[in-house]
Image: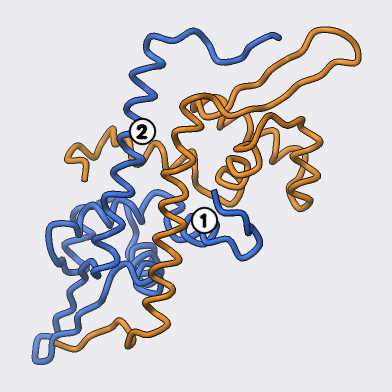
Chain colours: A blue, B orange
Amino acid sequence: MKNVVSDCSIESIMRVLSGRWPTLLLYYLKDGTKRFNELRRDNPTVSHRMLALELRKLEAAGIISRIDHDGYPRRVDYGLTEAGRRLVPLIDALGNWWEEVEAERGAAPPLSQVA
Amino acid sequence: MKNVVSDCSIESIMRVLSGRWPTLLLYYLKDGTKRFNELRRDNPTVSHRMLALELRKLEAAGIISRIDHDGYPRRVDYGLTEAGRRLVPLIDALGNWWEEVEAERGAAPPLSQVA
């Protein structure tokens, strides 16, 4: 694990990915670009404001890009960047880890030990 | 990426890892067990209450275990479980991803595109 903690890249990425929405948005964008309203329809419990904030945060982190189509009516699509696509399997690995641990815990004694 | 979202393992793991402290605590425990006060000394800005909450959350998730030593004075150590040790390289991969992207952005044009 990183030795330098202060300007720690792990802290930075976790700040971007923390909370419910970032990894869900990654999931919804993994198969192609989507419009704002499509993403809202996919995530009915997210507010307009929250979705806009999360998309801006992901864009600033280089995970998604915002494609502003010329013409009328105005059209804006969101899509994973190349870096964002590289992030997907890393997030999947966390999900797989969780499932493995859940399966193991299904069969394991309680964690706290008395030495 | 996982297809089943509702009881999504990714959402579960991100709920555990979200925020500043979980990944930092993983970092501090990766080389061996530590006592509560040692962890507080490593993270001077974390409150007693917050540290206790985060440790309990990590323990409930099967990432760390709490070793309660018999005898007086009472001694409690915290350490990574085997599953917790398997999580460390996955978190490192996120940190490495961040550093790669930062390096690439150092040389890349701004993200927003006009199609």
Earlier-in-chain disc, 2 versus 1 = 1
Q: Residue at x 38, y 85 (%)?
A: B107
Q: How many C-alpha atoms fall within 10 Å of the one at disc 2: few (<14), some, or many (≥20)?
A: many
| SS class, disc 2 | helix
User: Which residue bears the numbered disc 2?
Assistant: A97
User: Which residue bears the numbered disc 1?
Assistant: A10
Q: Residue at x 63, y 59 (%)?
A: A4
Tags 2 and 1 both on a single chain: yes
| SS class, disc 1 | helix
View extreme (right): residue: B73
Tell which of B46 and B107 is nearer to you: B107
Q: Position of residue B25 (x, y in %)?
A: 63, 41
Q: Position of residue A107 (x, y in %)?
A: 38, 9
Q: Residue at x 27, y 59 (%)?
A: A86
Tell which of B35 and A15 is nearer to you: B35
| Badge 1: chain ID | A
Q: Residue at x 34, y 59 (%)?
A: A47
| Badge 2: chain ID | A
The amino acid type found where label 2 is placed reads Trp
Q: Position of residue B2 (x, y in %)?
A: 21, 41
